[in-house]
Amino acid sequence: KAAEAPVVPDAKKPEESKPPEEAAKPAEAAKVVPEAYELKVPEKSPLDAAAVEAISSFAKEKGLSSEQAQAVLDREIVREQERHEALIAQVNKQSKDWADQAKADPEIGGEKYKENVLLAHSALKNLSVNEAFHDFMDKSGLGNHPEVIKVFAKVGSMMKDDSFHKPAGGQPKTKKST
């Protein structure tokens, strides 16, 4: 039978020889909780002032140092940017899916697709009051929805033969009865 080596206790570190509550004091002393956090928010941050204030309140409640509060803010900025990018990707995918559905639609798609889109654009141009609606339709992807194309193409078709012209002032000119 091999001789067993004697068990020698490890030398204790100075912090371990102190009671637990005293050993924690140096770490707490290094963590200074400020009265107000001076969080650095990037210029194009997706977080608004209310979100930054909520993070500041959370940090204060949890007793976080300025560095820890900044780390929480930085993490939230990254997470919000990721959510924003995912939402944009989802909107773009939905818009593409709608366009594909419209191209395959038996009523407005196939060989008739280009003509129907031009009719829809014509109606949209003649009916909308300002560019904000155009921007909304483009950015939201709703302009590619098959039902939206159907409606505007039908209106465009109805308007095609009309000689209605909207002057710069916005009110149509009408002929006076004689």
Image (spheres, rainbow, N blue to C red):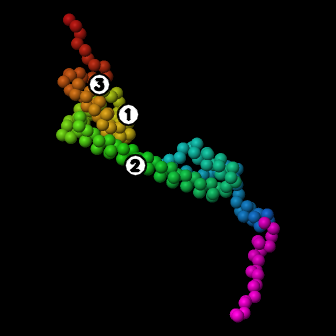
| Dominant secondary structure, magenta | loop
Q: Quadrant of residue 22?
A: bottom right
> Mark 2 vs mark 3: which is more N-terminal?
2
The residue that label 3 is drawn on is 168
* Residue 39 image position (x, y, % from top left): 60, 52
Rendered-image quadrant of the C terminus:
top left
Determine the residue positioned at 75% across, 64% down.
24
| Horizontal side, residue 69 vs residue 146: left or right | right
Q: Nearer the viewer, mark 1 or mark 3?
A: 1
Q: Which mark is residue 132?
A: 1
CA–CA distance in space, label 1 to label 2 = 22 Å
Q: Determine the secondary structure under disc 1.
A: helix
* Residue 122 image position (x, y, % from top left): 25, 31
Relative height, residue 178 to residue 74 (above, below): above
Q: Amino acid at mark 2?
A: Ala
Q: Which mark is residue 89?
A: 2
Residue 7 lies in the magenta-colored region: yes
* Residue 169 image position (x, y, % from top left): 31, 22
Q: Which mark is residue 158?
A: none
Relative height, residue 9 to residue 147 (above, below): below
Determine the residue positioned at 26% across, 27% down.
155
Q: Amino acid at mark 1?
A: Ala
> Mark 1 vs mark 3: which is more N-terminal?
1
